[in-house]
Image (cartoon, rainbow, N blue to C red):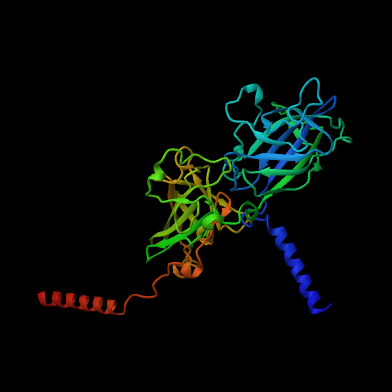
Amino acid sequence: MGLRDSAALVALVLAATCSVAVSYDPLDPNGNITIKWDVISWTPDGYVAMVTMSNYQMYRHIMAPGWTVGWSWAKKEVIWSIVGAQATEQGDCSKFKGGIPHCCKRTPAVVDLLPGVPYNQQIANCCKAGVVSAYGQDPAGSVSAFQVSVGLAGTTNKTVKLPKNFTLQGPGPGYTCGPARIVPSTVYFTPDRRRKTQALMTWTVTCTYSQQLASKYPSCCVSFSSFYNSTIVPCARCACGCGHGGHSPGGCIAGDSKRALSPGVNTPRKDGQALLQCTPHMCPIRVHWHVKLNYKDYWRAKIAITNFNYRMNYTQWTLVAQHPNLDNVTEVFSFQYKPLLPYGAINDTGMFYGLKFYNDLLMEAGPFGNVQSEVLMRKDASTFTFSQGWAFPRKIYFNGDECKMPPPDSYPYLPNSAPVAAPAIAAAAASAFLLALLLVA
């Protein structure tokens, strides 16, 4: 094999590796959203299925305006009815003379119902406006479900054709779904748990998230400061894109301008386009890590999260930090904290999130658009140091998206030593004091 062929092979392997790794999150290697279809009964022309969406991502949730699930039918199936959700379009149902199906589209798109719908339209785990919590933050809220009655379909395990080309918007792009696969039927227990029943047929679809597919720019940035250095390391300029290519293509608003107080400035747009406060970094979110205090056995850091988006508030927000001293967290003030152990024995990653009904809502840009807390960590004598930027996190994620970090050579540095004259002056003062005592005696 020639040198050119070897180079081509290496390039091919690297390309394949990169393409596979696009949806891989090293801090949550098993995170995904699984959509499960359980056929619970047969009908004269099809079946009734319970569709359950389970979010197994530890720190990435689906926030408002919620999820949209789509697929393509394998044949000419229709949706007769849905409980707990609805198709966004009915499609052309003109060939039906009697009962009209809920949706006749070959590629239906289904969304969750809003809270407060009549009880006869609800089902367990439905009707949350498409909001699904992260599994690590709220396991009970990480599930969404609806029931669908499918017609013009197969009526046995052998004649049913699985839907294909699944898509998931959560709420925007970023998720890629694999093909539907038949799995062992789901087993159910009766309320008294004395009897087991099972689905007539079950298939699942796995969807994974890629930040590169969601946006070409980061959605957050990180800044640093410390008590031992007066330098404040800001977010990098245009860290999240500037001008028409960034998160605020329609321009930005100066924080002290009258437009920031005008009616309607906080009204979200249907396309989700942000309206940012003008900053050098132009990021919707900034995370600031400040090394605050140094004790004999402990040290303390302050974390502040600021929202610069006038059109978005963040419910059930999450912040993930990777730092070697998170294995010795003693106390977290004002935030909830949960260690993440993606690799078992390595305990250097943790998730921070708000206290319910206190600061789990990060308001839009303005005087209330920030949340903050402090974390107290015990020192490990074998590893602890303030030099070489050790006290600052290696990675920061906000709502599951990795934030843009400052370059390592800009971190606040620890002064190498005190001025040479200082010890001499102190020694002279001590000597003079002792001499005075001797003279008095």
Compared to residue 279, the image places residue 389 above or below, namely below
Can you name the residue that lies furthest to the right here?
158
Does residue 196 appear in the picture of this structure? no
Q: Is residue 37 left or right of residue 66?
A: right
x, y percentage for residue 194?
A: 74, 27
Of residues 245 and 219, the one nearer the viewer is 245
The picture quadrant where one finds residue 16 is: bottom right
Instruction: Give the number of marks.
Output: 0
Foreground: 300 or 240? 240
Image position, residue 237 (x, y; %): 48, 62
In this view, the residue farthest toward the left is: 440
Q: Quadrant of the N terminus?
A: bottom right
**Image quadrant where residue 167 sits:** top right
Rendered residue at 61%/22% (across/down)? 118
Q: Is residue 132 above or below residue 225?
A: above
Q: Is residue 254 left or right of residue 423?
A: right
Q: Identify which residue is drawn at 28% across, 76% down.
A: 422
| Residue 119 locus on image (x, y percent) | 63, 22
- Can the viewer see residue 309? yes
**Image quadrant in which the C terminus is located:** bottom left
Question: On screen, 73 above or below 1?
Answer: above
Q: Is residue 129 above or below residue 366?
A: above
- The residue at 37%/75% (across/down) is 417
Residue 220, position in %: x, y?
A: 52, 54
Left or right: 382 as drawn, with respect to 345: left
